[in-house]
Image (cartoon, rainbow, N blue to C red):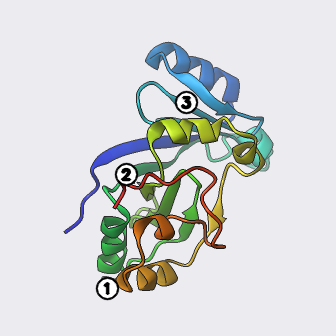
Amino acid sequence: MARPVKFAHVVYQTRRYDEMIAWYEDVFEARVVHQDPALAFLTYDDEHHRFAFANLDVLKPYGGDARGEVGVNHVAYTYANVGDLLDTYRRLKARGIAPYWPIHHGLTLSLYYRDPDGNRMEFQVDTCTAAQGEAFMKSDVFAQNPIGVSFDPEDLLARYEGGVDTPELLRSPQGEPSPIPAAHGLT
């Protein structure tokens, strides 16, 4: 059975965007990898990001609830390789557990799931090294689309089972290369 090899990051939704970024910079001695009015990504170690912040004042302006869904958006776990991620997908699917959002983020290939309480988690595999991921997050390409492109996990699983090699599996859903070079060691 494939298991995650590490805890990757946590994403918070906030209405105190600047305060949250400053607090995590101070407390964790983290540095900002990417920041725009809606999203910020920070790291304190060799991971491309350990924290992300979604600015609800931009993404979900105030409605009826003054708190506005503040809190943890999701936590992420990294798998050793795309095979382990897809084996997990297959195992969970057989148990009736399906991802609600398959997305190719550029620096990760990710499947998002909800637990019985609705807590969200991301199962991911890196498409590059942490240094390449951080460089990508600082690029104009990332700034134009910091979310990524949806993909069909069934198609990816069929391609994996058909023997398609790892770099090809890590390409974006439209067949374009990932915006950063795939780390060929990720098999």
Which is more N-terminal, label 3 or label 1? 3
Mark on residue 94? 1
- Per the image, the residue denoted by label 2 is 77
Q: What residue type is labelled 2?
A: Tyr
**Does residue 96 appear in the picture of this structure?**
no
Residue 24 vs residue 110, the one in the foreground: 110
Which is more N-terminal, label 2 or label 1? 2
Helix, strand or loop under label 1 = helix
Do the residues bearing badges 1 and 2 touch, measured as CB atoms within 8 Å? no
Badge 3, how many Cα within 10 Å: few under 14, some, many 20+?
A: many
Horizontal and vertical percent position of residue 40: 64, 35
**Does residue 141 appear in the picture of this structure?**
yes
Quadrant in the picture for the N terminus:
bottom left
Instruction: Specify whether 130 is left or right of 144.
Output: left
Residue 30 vs residue 185, the one in the foreground: 185
Note whether 144 is above or below 41 in the view shown: below
Q: Residue 137 sits in which quadrant?
A: top right
Frontmost of labels 1 and 3 is 3
Instruction: Name the residue at 49% across, 61% down.
Output: 110
Q: Report, in whole angstroms, how far the alpha carbon at label 1 lies from the one at label 2.
A: 21 Å
Mark on residue 42? 3
Horizontal and vertical percent position of residue 180: 59, 49
Instruction: Name the residue at 69% across, 46% down.
Output: 142
Badge 1, how many Cα within 10 Å: few under 14, some, many 20+?
A: few
Residue with the most extreme left position: 1
Helix, strand or loop under label 2 = strand
Q: Which amino acid does label 1 sit on?
A: Ala
Q: Residue 2 sits in which quadrant?
A: bottom left
Do the residues bearing badges 3 and 2 touch, measured as CB atoms within 8 Å? no
Note whether 86 is above or below 74 in the view shown: below
Helix, strand or loop under label 3 = strand
Residue 20 vs residue 88, the one in the foreground: 88
